[in-house]
Amino acid sequence: MNCDRIARAYRWLEYAAFGRELERRRFRYLDQVTSARCALILGDGDGRFLSRFLSRSHASVDSIDSSARMLELCRERVGNERAAYRHGDALSVPLAPSSYDLIVTHFFLDCFDSSGLGRLAARIRTAACPGALWLISEFRQPLWAAPIIRGLYLFFRVTTGLRVTRLADHRPILRAHGFSLLREETSWRGLLASELWRLS
Ligand SMILES: C[S@@+](CC[C@H](N)C(=O)[O-])C[C@H]1O[C@@H](n2cnc3c(N)ncnc32)[C@H](O)[C@@H]1O
C-alpha cells in the first residue's frame, strides 16, 4: 500500500464520505491516554491525531508510516518537538522491546489480513511495556454495511495498491496476544468503533 498519491486529499475525502465521525472515533478515548510517557503511533496519516494528542500530553512519540508523503504532512502539521518520524513498514521496522506505554492505530488495522494482524500484534506486544494501553479506531462490518466496506477496499486498491480485500476482525487476535478490551463504543449503526485495550 502506498498512500503518497492520496495523502494531501485524504482528509477531504474522509470528510466527504464520513463527515466528522472518524474524527470523533479517533478522539473518543483521548482523555484516557494523555498520561502516557512514550507512545508509538502506527499509520497516523496526516498527523491530525498526533497534533491533538501532543497538545494534551507530555509524551514523546514515535510515528511510523510507510508513506513518505503522509509523514511529511504530519511533520508540517506537528513539527519535531517530542515527535520522531520513521518511514517504514510496521511489520518490519525495528522496535525496541518494552518501550511504549501507549500504542495508537486509527483506521490502520484494516490494512492487514489476519496473518498480518497476528504478526503486528506479536510485534506490538514485544514493544509494549506491561500494562500498556492500545487505542484503536476501526471499521466493523455489520451485515448491512458489506457494500460500504467493499467499496472502501476497492477505492484503496485502485488508489494505493492495497492488496487486502476483506476486513479481518482484530479483536480475537489482540486477545490471543494478551490484550484485554477496557472500553468500546460504536457508531453509525455498528460500522465504526473506538476501542481502548490494555496489555495484561
Ligand atoms: C487508511 S490510512 C489511516 C490514516 C489515519 N490513521 C486515519 O486515522 O485516517 C492508513 C495509514 O497507514 C499507513 N500504512 C499502511 N500500511 C502500513 C504499514 N504496513 N506500515 C506502516 N504504515 C502503513 C498508510 O500510509 C496510511 O498513512
Image (cartoon, helix red, strand yellow):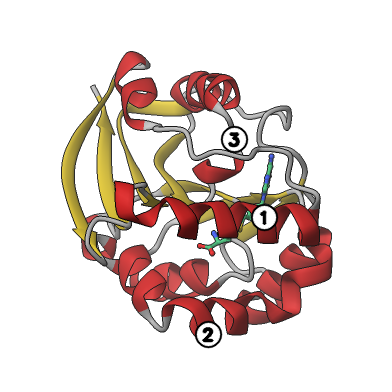
Q: Is residue 113 left or right of residue 68?
A: left
Residue flagged by tag 3: what amino acid is it? Phe
The mark found on residue 154 in the picture is 1
SS assignment at label 2: helix
Q: Is mark 3 within 8 Å of ligand 1?
A: yes
Mark 1–mark 3 Cα distance, whole angstroms, equals 15 Å
Give the mark toward the camera: 1 or 3: 1
Foreground residue among 37 and 164:
164
Q: Nearer the viewer, residue 14 or 30?
A: 14
Secondary structure beneath disc 1? helix
Q: Where residue 32 sits in the image (x, y, percent)?
A: 21, 57
Q: Position of residue 81 (x, y in %)?
A: 60, 69
- Amino acid type shown at disc 1: Leu
Disc 2 marks which residue? 16
Q: Is mark 1 within 8 Å of ligand 1?
A: no
- Residue found at x 20% / y 35%: 181
Disc 3 marks which residue?
Answer: 112
